[in-house]
Amino acid sequence: MRHHKAFIFTLIGYIFSILPPVLVAIEHFPLWIKAGEKSTCSALGVMVLLLCLIPLKRGISQALRSPAAWQMWLILFLVLYFTQYIAQGLMAVALVAFPFSVLGAIMFRLAKKCKEEERP
């Protein structure tokens, strides 16, 4: 009976520590943003929701001490599913940022070379 009580108290503790922040996060940081004809996932909303789930860390770490294969695949699926929209947005940023960062690095190298040539 004690084990049953502990489970109930643990469950209520998770509900109290997770549900209110999640509800407030959903209220103030919408997860879906209308972008033209498409809807996209709000990265800020996802980050705030992830912060709200911090109390689950203990339960997750206990479950992952000796994870079964299905648990690992489920976790991988959930992480990939919920981050795919963020990843698509970041791919566009990276596609532009990479070549310009390479050009910037070349310019910094040329500037350094010019400064070295000016010194006697």
Image (cartoon, helix red, strand yellow):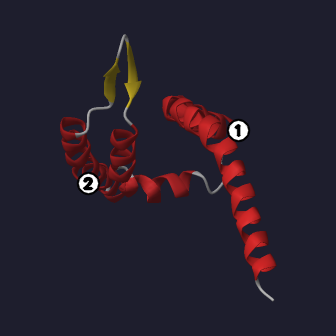
Instruction: Tell me if mark 1 has few (under 14), some (14-19) or many (20+) residues whose alpha carbon lies within 10 angstroms of its own.
Output: few
**Residue 13 horizontal/vertical position (percent):** 26, 55
Q: Can residue 33 be seen in this view?
A: yes
Mark 2 to mark 1 CA distance (whole Å)? 29 Å
Q: Give the residue furthest to the bottom.
A: 120
Which label was assigned to residue 69? 1
Q: In which quarter of the image is the C terminus?
A: bottom right
* Residue 10 coordinates in the image, percent (x, y): 32, 55
Q: Is residue 1 left or right of residue 120?
A: left
As shown in the figure, which amino acid type bears the numbered disc 1?
Ala
Write the residue at 79% across / 70% down.
113
Which of the 4 image quarters holds residue 24?
top left
Screen quadrant of the N terminus: bottom left
- Name the kind of residue labelled 2 in the image: Ser
**Residue 77 horizontal side relative to residue 39, left or right:** right
The residue positioned 45% from the left and 59% from the top of the image is 58
Residues 58 and 47: in front is 47
Q: In which quarter of the image is residue 84?
A: top right
The answer to whether 77 is drawn above or below residue 64 in the figure is above
The residue sitting at 76% across, 79% down in the picture is: 118
